[in-house]
Amino acid sequence: MNKIHFGLIAAATLTCTFSGMASASATTTNTTSTKVTTIQEAIKEAPLAAKKAKESVDALKKAEDTLTKTTQSATKLKQDSIKVLNSAEQTFQKADADYIASKAAYDAANKTLTDTKTVYDAANKTLTDTKTVYDAANKALTDAKATLAAAKTQAQKNLAQQAVNNATTSFNTANTKWSEAKTQFTTATTKLNDATGKCNSANSKLNDATTKRTTAEQARNKASEQAKTTTENADNLVKDAQDSRNQAKLTADNAAKYSVQAQEAANKASDWSTMKRLTVKDRSEDTNFLSILPQFQALVQKERVAISADKVQAQKVDFTQLFLTQKHNVRVWFLNEGATYKNQLAYEAIRGEKYDKGVAFENISCNSTRNKCEIGEKDGVLDSGDFVDLGSFKAGTQLNFLLKADGYSQTPKNGDIYGADASLNPDGLQHLMAWKIGNYLMMGFEDLRNGGDKDYNDAMFVVDFGKDNFKTAAVPEPSATLPILGLGALGMLKLRRRRRR
C-alpha cells in the first residue's frame, strides 16, 4: 500500500533543526531484569511450542520403541544366558552322577581288592605254614629211612620201619595239604591280580570322572556368573531405556502443557478486544502539533510507490533499544493512511517486571472528507493530527508499537500483527520504517503479508518521546538516499518553536 519517503533536504534540515536545540546522543541503560513476553513473542512462541510438543511426542514414540526393542533384546539375552546355564547345569549333573557312580565302583573295587588281599595273605600264610610242615615231614621221613637203613637187629628194623611208615603217612598228609595250599594260593593270587586290575581301572575311571566333574562345575559356575552379569546388564539397559522413556514422557507432557499455555497466550495476545483502549483526542486540542502537521504530511510518499529494500532496511527501528532516558508523557499522533484495511495500532511499555499495553488507535481509518489521505473513507474516524496520550512512563521504560492488519473489521481479511522485529512478523519481513526527527519518531507500516505494494504508508504515526529522551542508535536518521521532498523555512521555524516549549 502507501510508503513514506523523506526528502533529503527537508529531512536533513528538520533533523539539524532539532539537533541544534539539544543533543540527540543521550543514551540510556536497559533496566529490564525479568523477561516479559511481548504480544508478538507470545504469538511467535505458540507454533514453536507446538513444534516442540510434536518433536517431544516423536521423541517419546522413539523412546517407547527403543524401550520395547531393548526389553525384547534384554529378554532374549537373559533367556539365552539361562539356556546356557541350564545346559551347563545338566552337563554338571551328568558329570556329577558319573563321578558318584565311578566313586562307588572304585570303592567297591577297592573293597574287593582289600578282601582278596586278605584272602591272598591268608593263603600265602597257609602255604608257608604247610611248606614248613611239609619240610619237617620230609625231613622226618628222610631221617626215618636213614634209621631203617642203619638198623641191625630185627627189632630195630621193625621199630624203624614203623617210624618210616608213620613218617610217610605224615609226609603224605603234609604234601597233600601243601599241594592244597599251593592251589589256594594260586587261586588267591589270580583273584588278587584281577581285583587289582579292576581297582586300577575303577580308579582311572574315577579320575576321569573327577576331571569331567571339575570341568563341568567350572563351566556351570562360569555360566552362572555370565547369566548373572547378563541379567544385570540387560536389566540396566531396560532401566536406562525406561528412564529415557519416562524422561521423554515428562518432556512430552511438559511440552504439551506448555504448548497449550503458549497457544492460549498467543490467542490472548492476538485478541485485542479485551485490551485497554485509549481515548483518541481531537487534533484541535494540540495546536502546537497541528501547526507543524503539514511539514510531516509533506514527508508522506504517494500511494503504491514501492520503496527499495535497501532503503527499507536503512530505516529499521530497534525497539529493544528504545528506552526513555527520563520520565515522560508519551503522545502519539495519527498522520496518514494508505490502506483499505481498518487497521489497529497497539503499544507495549516494559520496565523491569512491569508491563503495560493498550490499543492506541482502534480504527485507523482516515476521514477523506476532511483530510488529504492517501486512501481515505467518508466514514473514517480519524483526522490527521488526532492523538492519544499513552501515559507517563518512568525512565528506563522500553516502548514498542504494533499494527494489527484489518483488526477493527468484524470479519478481518487478515489479522496479522506486525512490529519492528522482522523475525517476529508472520512472514519474517520488515513491515515498519521509522525516522528519528529530533525528538520525534515517525513510523510507517506496510499492512500486507510478504510486503504488499511496499509503500509503507498504510498507517503512519508520529510519536513524541520528549527532549533527548531516546537513543539515536535505536532509530535511524532519515536516509540520504531518499527522494527530495523539500520543506519550507516557515515549517522549520514552527518545528523549532514547538520543541523549545
Image (cartoon, grey):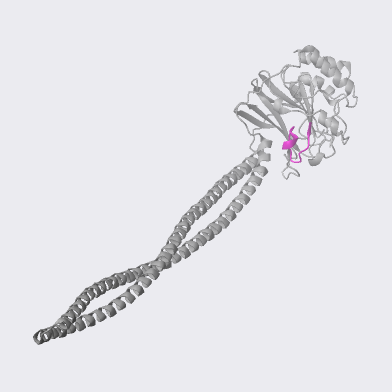
Classify 267 as above or below 349. Answer: below
Range of magenta residues:
418-432
User: Which quarter of the rendering shows the N terminus?
Assistant: top right
Extreme residue in the left direction: 155
On screen, residue 267 versus residue 124, left or right, reads right
What x and y, as percent, mark residue 385?
78, 26
Give the image quarter of residue 422: top right
Give 216 or 80, whichever is nearer the viewer: 216
What x and y, as percent, mark residue 311?
85, 30
Classify 169 as above or below 361. Answer: below
What x and y, as percent, mark residue 224?
45, 57
Classify 409 as above or below 25. Answer: below
Asked whether the viewer can see residue 389, the reply is yes
Give 465 or 100, whichever is nearer the viewer: 100
Residue 427 belongs to the span the image colors magenta: yes
Residue 273 belongs to the span the image colors magenta: no
Asked whether the viewer can see residue 362, the reply is no
User: Which quarter of the rendering shows the C terminus?
Assistant: top right
On screen, residue 368 versus residue 51, left or right, reads right
**Mostly what secondary structure, the magenta segment?**
loop
Residue at image x 35%, y 73%?
A: 193
